[in-house]
Image (cartoon, helix red, strand yellow):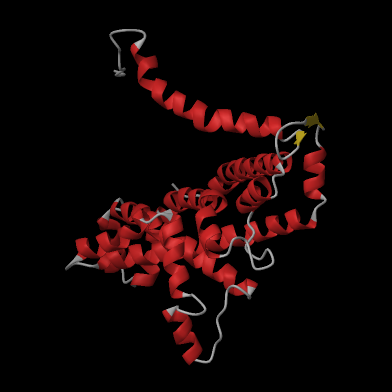
Amino acid sequence: MEKRVVFGHPVLPYLLVAPQIAVTLIFFIWPASQALFQSVLRQDPFGLRTEFIWFENFIELFTTPAYMDSIKVTVVFSFSVAILALTVALYLAVQADRVIRGGMAYKTLLIWPYAVAPAVAAVLWLFMFSPTLGIITYTLEVLGYDWNHKLNGTEAMMLVVVASSWRQISYNFLFFLAGMFAIPKSLIEASAIDGAGPAKRFWTIVFPLLMPTTFFLLVMNMIYAFFDTFGVIHMISEGGPAGATMIMVYKVYEDGFRALDLGGSSAQSVVLMAIVIALTVVQFRYIERKVEY
C-alpha cells in the first residue's frame, strides 16, 4: 500500500515551498534574466544611453583573443582543480577508513578546511608563497629554486589550483568517506579471504562501488571551479600575470566592474552559464552511463 503525505489545508504545501521559490526567483531567475537582457544592449559607463545591438556583444567576445584565452585558462584550471581535489580526497578517505585509534579526531581535522572561506584560504596560501616573506618560498630558495608567482604565469596557475583544491578536498572527503561506510564490510572481508591485497580490493570492489559518489563530486567540483574560485583568483593573482590565471568568472568582473563594459560582461555571464549547463547535461547524459550503481 502506497503511503502519501496529506496536508490538512490546500494552501499549506505552497506556503512551505514559498521561501525556496522566493530565494530562487530573487537570487537566480531575476539576475539571470537581467544578464540575458543586458547582453543584447550597449550602455555607456554611466547608464545614460542604451542601444539595442542584438548579438554584437557575443560576436565581439568570440573574436577577441583575450576572451578565447580565458576559456582555455578556465578549462585547464577547472580540470586541474577537480582532478587534484578528488584524487587527494579519495586517498585521505581510504586512509581514514583504516584508522582505528584516534580516527574521529583525524577525520575532524580533515573536515575543518571546508569551513574556511575561499578568500581566506587564498590569503593563507599567499602568505606561505609570498616572494618576500613566504616560508615555502624561502625553503625553495634554499634548495636553489627562485619562486615568484607574480612574474611567472605557470607558478601563478599552480598556486591558485592548489589553493582552490585545498578547501574543496574536505568537501570531497566527506562524501567519499560516507560512500565507503555504505560499502558492506562482508565484501571486503570475502575478498581478503580469497587472497586479494589492499590495492586489488580497492580497484575491484571499493572504487567501482564509489562511482556514483565520484560522478556526483566530479560535477560539483567542476561547478565549484567555474564559479566559487573567484575569491581565490582575486586575492592571489587578480588574473595575472599577463592573463595566466584569468578564468572566465574573473573576466566577467574585470570587464564589468573595472572596464565598465556592462553589455560585454553580461554576455560573458550568459556564455558562462550556458557552458556550465551544457557541461552538466553532458556529464549526466553520457558519462553517467558508464557509472556502476
Q: Is residue 55 above or below residue 151?
A: above
Is residue 43 rendered to the left or right of residue 128?
Answer: right
Above or below, 75 against 194 in this view is above
Residue 231 appears at what percent x and percent y?
50, 55
Q: Nearer the viewer, residue 14 or 126?
A: 126
In the rendered image, the residue lying farthest to the top is 9
Q: Where residue 82 sits: x, y (%)?
A: 52, 59
Q: Is residue 189 visible?
A: no
Residue farthest along the left direction in this orientation: 101
Is residue 22 shown left or right of residue 273? left
Q: Residue at x 35, y 66 (%)?
A: 92
Measuring 62% from the left and 41% from the top, which residue is drawn there? 273
Residue 246 in percent (x, y) is at: 64, 59
- Count of labels in the image: 0
Residue at (31%, 52%) from the top-left corner? 178
Residue depicted at 57% across the width and 51% down the height: 226
| Above/below status of 25 relative to 123 | above
Which quadrant of the view contains residue 17? top left
Q: Classify the position of the N terminus by image quarter.
A: top left
Q: Position of residue 250 (x, y in %)?
A: 61, 53
- Viewer-side residue, 52 vs 13: 52
Q: Nearer the viewer, residue 77 or 64?
A: 64
> In the picture provided, is 60 more to the left or to the right than 166?
right
* Quarter of image, res 267: top right
Instruction: Please say whether residue 16 is visible from this viewpoint.
Output: yes
- Is residue 225 shown above or below 203? above
Compare residues 234 and 140 and report the one nearer the observer: 234
